[in-house]
Structure formats: C-alpha cells, structure tokens
Amino acid sequence: MADSRLESFNTTNIDFEPGAPEPSQTGPKPRRRSLYVATHRHLPRGVNPAGESHRRGFHPWYFLRICFRSSSIITTFVNILWPAVPAAIALYFIEVGQDRPDLEVPVFALNYVAMVPTANLIGFAGQQLATKLPKVLGVIFETFLGSIVEIILLMVLLKQDTISNNLINVIRDAILGSILANMLLCLGACFVVGGIRYESQQFDGVISEVGSGLLLTAGFGLAIPSLKGTIGRDELESLILKISRATSIILLVAFALYVWFQMRTHHSLFDAVLEQEDTKDRESEDVKNSKLTLTECLVALVIALALVSMHAVFLVKSIDPIVKNNNISDMFMGLILVPLVEKLAEHLGAVQEAYDNQMNFALSHVLGSTLQTALLNSSLVVLVGWGMDKSMDLSFSSFQVILLILSILVVGNFIRDRESNYLEGSLCILVYLIIAIATFYVPNADQGAETASGTPA
C-alpha cells in the first residue's frame, strides 16, 4: 500500500537542491521522495518542512547568508551587532576572573547590545518556521517565540533575587514596562511608519475588538492586587501574595481561553483575515528573499536561545551594581531599559509588517505579545516564584496602575475605529516618552517604599 502511494507521486513536483539536474520524466522514480516521506511522516498535518525554501536539510552557507540578510533592511542592520556577542561573553569572564568592578558598566552595556541580534535571530527563525505552519498557529507560535526572551529574563531575575538586591521590584516593573512598550512604543511606531507611507491603514475589527477586550481584562487583573488601601495593615503582605497567586491562575485561564478561541472555535474568522493579509505579503519584497528549511529554523532557534539565556544571566548579574553605583532608579531599569531589549526584535518585525501595509499581522503581533505578557508571563513568574518560595506578587504602585489603565484606554480608543494614521502613532510614542522621563526621575527610596510587598515606608 505504501509503495503504491509512493509510486503515484509526480516527479515534476519534487523540490531539488539548487543547481541539481532535473530528473528525466521517463526514467525511474528517485528514492529521495520516498525517503523524505518516510522521514517526515510523523509531522502534524499542515506542517510543511520545505516551506518556501525549496530546499531540505541543513546547508551552512545558505543558513548563514539567509540569517544575516534576515527579513528586512532594518533587521539586516541589527545583525551588524553580532560582534558584540563574543565580546560580551569574553568581557564578563574577564570581570569575574580578575575581580574587576570597574568593568561593571561595560559588561552591562555589551550584554545589553548583544541581546539585540540574538533576540532578532529568534524572531527571524520563528517567522520562518511560522510560514511552514497553518496561518493562525503560525502567528501564535511566532508571537510566543518573540516573547521567549522576556520569559528567560524574568526567570533569571527571579532566580537571582535575594534580600540584598530585591530584584522582584525590577521584575514587576519589567512586566508593566513590557506591556507599555508594546501598546505605546511598538504600536505607535507601526502607526507612524505605516502612516508615512500610506495616508491611512485599515485593520479588521475581529483582531482589534478581541484584543482590546482582553487588554481591559488583563489590566483589571493586574490592578486588583495593587489596591492596598482597601486592606488592613496586619496581614497585608500575606494577603497580597494570596490575591496575586489566585489572580495569576485566573489570568492563565483567560490566556487559555484566548488561545482556544483563536485556534478552535473561531479560527475561521482569524484564518480569513490573515489569509487576506497574506496575499499582500506575496506582493512584498520579503517573499523574494530566500527561506530557511525546517532543520535550519530549529538550528537557529537552538543557537539563539542558548546565547540569549547566557546574555540574560550576565545582564541580570550586572543590574544590582549598576543601579547602586550609577544612581539609576529601579523603576527606570525595569520599566524602560529591560523591556526595550526584550522586545526590540519583535518590535522591528511588527514595524516592517506595518511598512508593508500588513496591519492585521502587525496588530496581531503587538496585541498578542501584550496579552501574552499580561496574561501568561506575569502569571508564570508569580507561580514559579511560589514554587521557589519567593514573595513574588503583582503589587504595583498606584503610579504604575494609573499608567497601565490610562495606556489601555488610550490604545483602545485609537484602534476602535479600525483605522490608523501617523498622528495617532506619534501620540502613542509621545505618551511613552513622558512615562520614560517620569520614571527616570523617580528615586529608588520612594519606589521601594511604595512597591515593596505593599508595606508602607
């Protein structure tokens, strides 16, 4: 039975290596197809190992060339930063081996820069792998990989937290900062870049309405544990911890419902929207670029994840001395600096999609990443902290809660009309700049007194 199916394949549809001679139409059927089918028979339906690459397996030269060219001109320039990767690793071990505290700032700066190209490689490999999956699954998978850098950083911060450095404050700030960077900076940049090229851009109401509704739900869930004034002082810390853990479980349920809604019950709505957007993608310059094979995508992800994890550890170990010795506030470090390096590669991808007039894809990535941070990543770090017996909670300061709620309302108002322009994008970016300036001047003592486990100074 298997042999008869294999014999029925038409050799004219076989993908061959570049430069390989084309088989004779009357000659014997090549064994490559049968070996290929036997090897990849275990893959799920809808997964296309060859994708658009017209190649199979791993080819080092093609792999390096395609990864360096990446998916756009912007990300190609990001790849110029790759020399910072070995330099950051070497400098860290020099600082540790020779006990050189004077190298703390260079180590932090180099590892900060080195995370940009490695995170970009994760995003690019995820984007390439998504083209080999069904549309909705591909977008969800690509969004998840875009946020994997954030998950790694949050977990490393949680692991390195001690009584002396109190990195839990930085974790809380990083969660909020990631949400604000997505909603205001990234979405604003998409609106500006797309609005400069096009007078206005439209997007589907399915994506904007579902996204804005879930954002309000996430904002409500994150704000509730921060309402410290309604609880007595006696067991304040314990109560906030219990509320945060219970809220995290509920937010995880909300995220599961969101994924189920997209993947199962209403996937046809999202499929139709993204399929229509994909027709624009075929007309864009990106389609003309060479693609990675399935094997090359997996190799790129393994390399990039290993490097990102390494740089995350080096970066986190430098945060405490940087904050203490250079008068940088915890809030500015967590709310602005850490989220920028977490999300930069993903932001560049979304901006490129807006430039190509693929606003549904861009909005899906921005809102999907925001919801993943608010519903999944924040819950994971609280529950993992619970397992590690750390007092990780969602007790944000009143200032931070106000920032979160107002930002959700601003973004919801802008995407309500299903149309964007450069003015709306510029306003989002200006709001983000105001927040960055305000957090830069917040002293550590005030921030710590208000946010440390909800205990007044």
Image: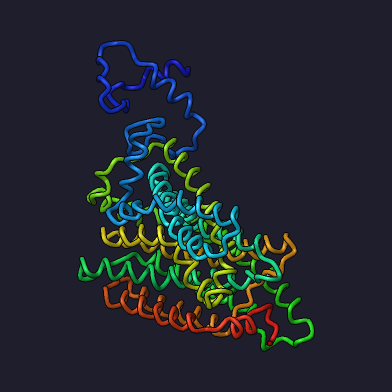
- Across and down, in percent, residue 240 comes to 70, 77
Q: Quarter holding the C terminus?
A: bottom right
Q: Nearer the viewer, residue 80 or 21?
A: 80
- In this picture, residue 356 sits left or right of residue 225: left
Residue occupying image coordinates x 46% and y 82%:
406
Color theme of the render: rainbow
For this rendering, which residue is in front, 64 or 11? 64
Residue most extreme to the right: 234
Residue 59 percent location from the top left of the image: 37, 31
Quadrant in the picture for residue 113: bottom left
Q: Residue at x 53, y 47 (%)?
A: 306
**Foreground of the two, 273 or 420:** 420
Total marks in image: 0
**Image location of residue 15, percent across then percent down:** 32, 28
Judge whether residue 249 can be spotted in this image: no
Q: Is residue 77 left or right of residue 388?
A: left
Instruction: Kindly indicate the quadrant of the structure image that contains residue 377.
Output: bottom right
Q: Quadrant of residue 171?
A: bottom right
Left or right of residue 161, residue 53 in this image = left
Looking at this rendering, what residue extends furthest in the top direction? Answer: 27
In the image, residue 223 sits, relative to residue 175, either above or below, namely below
In the rendered view, tell whether residue 424 sits above or below residue 350. Answer: below
Q: Residue at x 25, y 25 (%)?
A: 19
Q: Is residue 393 visible?
A: yes
Percent coordinates x, y for residue 316 in the rendering: 57, 62
Q: 69 or 219: which is nearer to us?
A: 69
